[in-house]
Image (spheres, helix red, strand yellow):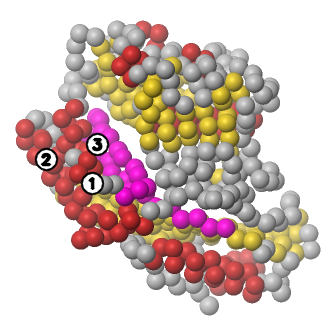
């Protein structure tokens, strides 16, 4: 029979729904035991509840549940594999039966998870947002507070934002072993006049929703009003100071392919400035990116990737690397190495010393899509940024006109920007990492 979950978006039902789904998967496995030697199931379910916010009002963003299912069935040294988007176990069985068996590239292996698992779901956050429909009230307050601030400081013509709660669970079952995880987080974002914005993501229930309700108003109050385009501003040494959010986005895009494929680095070799210490820690509590197992159902582990500028550990991609805990599966079934929760150690100087080191620098707060070449070069448009100039007010970087370009590490095509990087004493929790501000040269 099919699987019908009565899961609510709110409340205590999420852990119970996960347990019921896990029981259903194991029952499905047992039912197919007469037809196959082994059956592996990977199942991810995502849902969200919330509102898009604009000057005109609110629009529902409620979505889900959305299911992604991957099945592998083994018999006599051959394997059937299929991916589908359905919770119906009858459809799972039919889809497997329709596939053509192929020679098994690898034998099935048991799944496992690190212990203790990280805390990635706070039921108190769901209860808080569900109480008297706080999520809707928060979205209304974000809009109303921004409009109120715009009455005092005129010029606001566009507000684009959202308030949403996102939840996801993942199940991996192989043979007699099974693992599961549950994550939930809130995201609040606001972009003003298509030029500048801010966002907050968090897993834990906050003591107060007021800072989130004031996000748009605060951003409008602090936002520079004048635009600057390339050619109107000379940036000494191509310096840019990256907000931890922008730094993390760059590291996530450009670092894993390099660490998964570099063969010329040896343990202890100098690859970056001594200010750079980077750790991938899937066990950090309160991070929505933390996980006890990867998308192959293998236990994760903490990796000190770079310590004081020296290479210490890599990442590994592809099925067949047992116990590495770094694999992620995309929507097409492809596998690649990825970072979990990123931890970068603080530096010795504070943020103001970092930006005051030159008469003109650029503060990059958010990046657009990041392109990375096989050789390790990156290029990304600056979505939100501002100039920091001695003797005058900051100016907004015209969106889409400014680009961040370079490479993280030295290579045949040129030096890497991490070789001379400096980082601040301040650390920021992005909900997927804890990182400092970082100054890079020759990237603007």
- N-terminal of the two: label 2 or label 1? 2
- From which residue to which does the magenta span run? 179-205
Kindly give the residue lying farthest to the bottom in the view shown. 1
Query: Mark 3 highlights which residue?
Result: 191
**Mark 3, secondary structure of its residue:** strand
Please determine whether, in this image, residue 369 is positioned above or below residue 290.
above
Separation (CA) of disc 2 from disc 3: 13 Å
Q: Which residue does the image show at 47% across and 30% down from the upper left?
A: 436
Q: Position of residue 433 (x, y in %)?
A: 51, 42
Q: Position of residue 186 (x, y in %)?
A: 38, 56
The percent position of residue 399, horizontal first and vertical second, equals 34, 31
Circle 1 — which element? loop
Disc on res. 208: 1
**Residue at the image point whose x is 71% and y is 28% from the top:** 311
Residue 266 tag number: none
Q: Does residue 182 show up magenta in the picture?
A: yes
Q: In this image, 49 relative to 227: left or right?
A: right
* Residue 61 can be seen, yes or no: no
Could you tell which of marks 2 and 3 lies nearer the N-terminus? 2
Which comes sooner in the sequence, label 1 or label 3?
3
SS for tag 2? Answer: helix
Residue 128, picture quadrant: bottom left
Of all residues, the one furthest to the right in this rendering is 76
**Quarter of the view holding residue 110:** bottom right
Judging depth in this view, the residue of 189 and 309 nearest the camera is 309
Q: Above or below — where is 114 with respect to 423?
A: below
Residue bearing the label numbered 2: 147
Q: Are there few (<14), some (14-19), or many (20+) residues within 10 Å of tag 1?
A: few
Disc 2/disc 1 C-alpha distance (Å): 21 Å
């Amino acid at each position: 029979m099919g699987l019908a979950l009565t899961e609510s978006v709110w409340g205590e039902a999420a852990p119970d729904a996960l347990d019921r789904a896990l029981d259903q998967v194991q029952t499905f496995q047992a039912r197919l035991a007469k037809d196959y030697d082994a059956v592996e199931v990977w199942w991810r379910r995502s849902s969200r509840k919330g509102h898009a916010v604009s000057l005109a009002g609110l629009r529902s963003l409620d979505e889900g549940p959305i299911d992604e299912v991957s099945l592998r069935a083994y018999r006599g040294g051959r394997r059937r594999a299929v991916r589908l988007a359905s919770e119906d176990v009858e459809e799972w069985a039919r889809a497997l039966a329709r596939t053509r068996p192929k020679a098994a590239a690898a034998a099935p292996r048991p799944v496992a998870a690190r212990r203790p698992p990280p805390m990635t779901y706070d039921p108190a956050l769901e209860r808080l947002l569900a109480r008297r429909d706080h999520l809707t009230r928060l979205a209304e307050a974000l809009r109303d507070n921004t409009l109120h601030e715009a009455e005092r400081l005129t010029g606001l013509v566009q507000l684009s934002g959202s308030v949403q709660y996102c939840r996801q669970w993942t199940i991996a079952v192989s043979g007699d072993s099974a693992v599961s995880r549950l994550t939930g987080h809130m995201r609040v974002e606001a972009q003003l006049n298509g030029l500048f914005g801010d966002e907050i993501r968090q897993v834990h229930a906050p003591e107060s929703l007021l800072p989130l309700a004031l996000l748009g108003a605060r951003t409008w109050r602090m936002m520079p009003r004048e635009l600057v385009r390339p050619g109107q501003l000379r940036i000494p040494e191509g310096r840019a100071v990256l907000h931890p959010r922008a730094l993390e986005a760059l590291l996530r895009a450009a670092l894993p392919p390099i660490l998964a494929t570099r063969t010329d680095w040896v343990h202890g070799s100098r690859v970056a400035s001594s200010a750079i210490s980077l750790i991938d820690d899937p066990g950090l509590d309160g991070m929505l990116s933390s996980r006890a197992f990867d998308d192959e159902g293998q236990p994760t582990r903490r990796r000190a990737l770079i310590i004081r500028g020296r290479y210490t550990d890599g990442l590994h991609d592809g099925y067949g690397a047992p116990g590495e805990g770094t694999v992620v599966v995309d929507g097409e079934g492809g596998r690649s190495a990825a970072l979990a929760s990123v931890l970068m150690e603080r530096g010795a100087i504070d943020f103001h010393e970092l930006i005051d080191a030159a008469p003109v620098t650029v503060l990059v707060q958010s990046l657009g899509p990041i392109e990375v070449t096989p050789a390790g070069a990156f290029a990304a448009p600056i979505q939100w940024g501002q100039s920091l100039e001695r003797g005058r007010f900051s100016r907004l970087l015209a969106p889409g006109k400014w680009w961040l370009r370079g490479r993280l590490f030295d290579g045949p095509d040129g030096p890497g920007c991490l070789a001379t990087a400096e980082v601040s004493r301040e650390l920021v929790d992005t909900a997927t990492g804890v990182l400092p501000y970082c100054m890079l040269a020759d990237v603007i």
